[in-house]
Image (tube, rainbow, N blue to C red):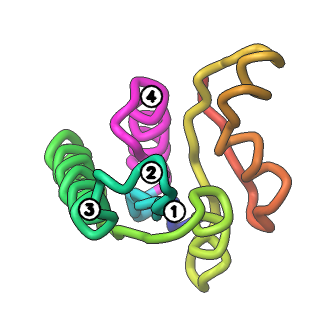
Amino acid sequence: MSHYLVAVDGSEAAGKAAQMAVDLAAKTQAKVTFVYCVVPIVNTAEMVWVPSADFDRAQERAGEQILAEAQARFAAAGVTLATRLLRGPAAETIADEAKRPGYDLLVVGSHGYGVVKRLLLGSVATRLLHVCEKPILVVR
């Protein structure tokens, strides 16, 4: 394997996944690309007080910060690192990115929610297991 795609969102689970991917990449001389997905909101009547363009830009800034922190955290690991800011529904957009030529493995974190919480809160990691065509390493 030569190139790992790692989904990050600033959570502890994503941090563990990033650490695992970088450690593995250092041993295999692979490259790592961190991705953050900006999920667009639907501006409903209840949310008219939040201009969607402002919210989207705030999400972009947060994503850029998370990507910069991930890159800085692992800069000394001796691994080639890159970042990409994506836009769209998280699992589907990350799966589409993973389909691009060159990626061999998708690495994601899991919060380890039980069945009830996962049903209520959703799980990008679980959804990726259903929609992604590439091998996936789920780190808990």
44 left or right of 132 in image: left
Residue 8 locus on image (x, y percent): 42, 46
22 magenta-colored = yes
Camera-near label (1 vs 3) is 1
Span shown in magenta: 7-28
Distance, label 4 to label 3, CA atoms, is: 22 Å
Residue 72 locus on image (x, y percent): 14, 47
Under mark 3, the amino acid is Glu
Choose the circle earlier in sequence order: 4 or 3.
Answer: 4
Sort mark 4 into few (<14), some (14-19) or many (20+) by Cα contacts within 10 Å. Answer: some
Please indicate, yes or no, whether residue 93 appears anywhere in the rendered image.
yes
Residue bearing mark 1: 42
Residue bearing mark 3: 60
Picture disc at residue 25: 2
Choose the circle earlier in sequence order: 4 or 2.
Answer: 4
Asked whether the residues under the numbered discs 3 and 2 touch, taking CB atoms below 8 Å apart as contact, a structural biologist would say no
Q: Please, what is the dominant secondary structure of the magenta stretch?
A: helix
Camera-near label (4 vs 2) is 4
